[in-house]
Each structure stands twice: as C-alpha cells, then as structure tokens.
Amino acid sequence: MPIYEFECEGCGARFEELVAAGRAAACPSCGSERTRRLYSEVAPPGRQPRGAGVRADESRRREREGARQGRLAETKKRRAAGEKP
Ligand SMILES: [Zn+2]
C-alpha cells in the first residue's frame, strides 16, 4: 500500500497514512474525516522499498544494451550491403 500525505480540512494538520487507493484517512489530531489527499506521494529515500531503484537501473541498463545491439546489427547490415552490393 502506498503512503499518502493528507491535509485535514478541519484543523489543517498534515499527516501521512498508509491507505488503499481511493480511500481517505481520518485526521489523527482532530479525528475529522474531511481530509484531502495531497497529490505528491510521499517517498523519501529512506522509505523506498528496497530494490525498487536497483530494478529501475537494471531495466534502464537492459534498454541501453538493447539499443546498442540494434545499432550494431544495423551497422553490420549496412556494412555488408556496402561490401557486397
Ligand atoms: Zn484535523
């Protein structure tokens, strides 16, 4: 479940809460349920799930590798075509 930041419309308090998507959380300081979800998902580095960044790096690396292979194949094709018209 993602951590969302909420702002209470009653007392203005801001708090973070783990909630299912589309759900609101009650204000911890006044108990009001008139809370507004702030549209910045709270994800400070210390709280990021372990491995998320690593996986992103890995997929970026694979993308680059794939692009490189594609260019190599393209170059080979052109070279082959040039050498044997
Ligand atoms: Zn409140």
Image (spheres, rainbow, N blue to C red):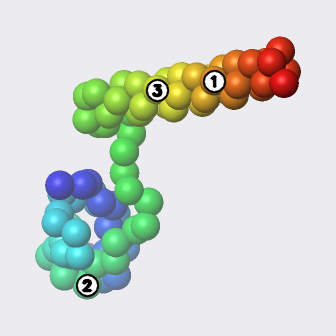
Residue at point 34%, 77% (across, down)? 36
Q: Which residue is mark 1?
A: 73
Which of the two discs, 1 and 2, labels the residue nearer the N terminus? 2
Q: Residues within 10 Å of mark 2 (few under 14, many from 20)?
A: some
Visible residue check, residue 41: yes
Indicate which quadrant contains ligand 1.
bottom left
Residue at point 26%, 54% (across, down)? 3
The answer to whether the residue labelled 2 contacts the one labelled 3, judged by CB atoms less than 8 Å apart, is no
Q: Which residue is mark 2?
A: 34
Residue 85 position in % (x across, y down): 84, 24
SS assignment at label 1: helix
Question: CB at mark 2 closer than 8 A to ligand 1?
Answer: no
- Amino acid type indicated by mark 3: Arg
For residue 65, side relative to residue 7 (left or right): right
Foreground mark, 1 or 3?
A: 1
Which of the two discs, 1 and 3, labels the residue nearer the N terminus? 3
For residue 41, side relative to residue 30 (left or right): right
Q: Residues within 10 Å of mark 1 (few under 14, many from 20)?
A: few
SS assignment at label 2: loop
Q: Which residue is mark 3?
A: 62
Residue 1 position in % (x across, y down): 17, 55
Visible residue check, residue 46: no
Task: Name the quadrant containing residue 24.
Answer: bottom left
For residue 27, side relative to residue 45 (left or right): left
